[in-house]
Image (spheres, rainbow, N blue to C red):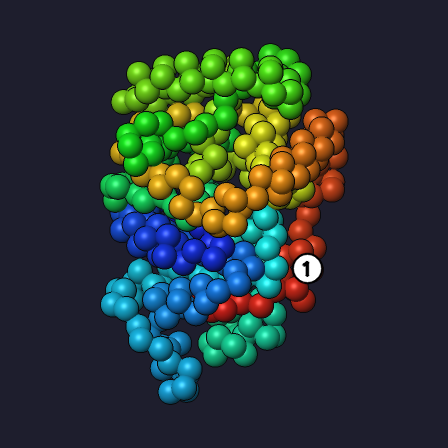
Amino acid sequence: MQRVGVVVLNFNNYEETIRCTDSLLAQRGIVLSLVIVDNGSANDSCGRLRERYEMPAAREARTDEEKQPCHEIPAEHRAAVTLIHSPENLGFAGGMNLGIDELRGRRRRTDTEIRQLRLPETVLRESGEPADFIFLANSDLVFSDPYILQQMVRAWEPGVGVVNPMVVNTDGSPALRVHFRAKYLCLRMLKTYFPVLETLRSRRRRTAEKEAGKEAGRSRIERGEYTVVGCGYMYGPDFFRHYDRMYPETFLYGEEYATILYLHKAGLCTMLAETAPIIHRHGASTPADLHSDPAFREKMRRRGHNVLVRLMLRSEQSIQKKYGSVSRKESGGERWESSGEWR
């Protein structure tokens, strides 16, 4: 069976993360490796996630004062879960890259992690086989069928960099997706920075979403156009032949644009896969203070625009030179502390 990695990003919302993770642990027909990245949460997210997914052997190694009530999650499910804690909020791309590095075998554990986890050093130091397929999931997704990831892997074809599943909102409408035609791609992206032009484009996007709804029921590779479903999509093996990770300079907005630019520069396609629906509880993973702070949202949008312009001017080779290699510090050497890993 194909090994598939999944990264779930948590930020102050462990309830949604648990709902998403439990639905992922029910996936069948693949070898699942699941990484939960806690992105600098200010609440007790790490403690709640640890007590739910900790392996019995690691739990027994802790003192009575450290032990907390453990929910009944089968041991074979807990064995697939790794929890990584970042002491600061790295943004969407930064947090996802931490999980990608783990799944691709590039994040080296620290001595502090090894002491905290109380597991043999040889177990912790080994990277294992890197995942060829990596699904990036918002924490507000619920997988409605146990074979969705298998369906995506089977739909993949060489030359496809990103596989999109069928994602619907709780009301049954298609989840938001970013769609661009390949011709004059950079110009089309720049036009979205201007509100009037973006309004016209939004009308065309809604038409494209309706057409996508008609296409549901069969997989198709997109030629001359790109689509990325931002709340959940999968990188295929060909993506990792060109890039190590996501474009790391974005924080909250622009990740889908950056992914499309990566694919365009590498000559890769996107695919819409025939899958059972993934339910998107839209906005449930977004902190309430962000909803009520339009000034901060606008600041992040402008930041995303600026870094994307710089990305447009880079070649694939310069991207690989700047971001392709992962230094010890970037991949977790001295910077990260893990709340726990259970294999």
- The reply, left or right, for residue 328 in relation to residue 40 is right
Q: Residue at x 57, y 19 (%)?
A: 198
Look at the image and tell me in which quarter the C terminus lies.
bottom left
The residue indicated by pointer 1 is 328
- The reply, left or right, for residue 173 in relation to residue 118 is left
Look at the image and tell me whether residue 326 can be seen: yes
Query: Percent position (x, y) of residue 144?
Result: 26, 41
In the current view of this chain or complex, which residue is farthest to the front? 292
Query: Percent position (x, y) of residue 150?
Result: 32, 39
Numbered label tally: 1
- The reply, left or right, for residue 304 in relation to residue 53 is right
**What kind of residue is marked 1?**
Arg
Residue 250 quadrant: top right
- The reply, left or right, for residue 261 in relation to residue 64 is right
Q: Residue at x 67, y 67 (%)?
A: 334
**Secondary structure beneath disc 1?**
loop
Q: Residue at x 39, y 25 (%)?
A: 272
Q: Foreground: 49 or 261?
A: 49
Q: Residue at x 38, y 87 (%)?
A: 64
Look at the image and tell me whether residue 31 can be seen: no
Query: Percent position (x, y) of residue 21?
Result: 35, 53
Q: Foreground: 42 or 57?
A: 42
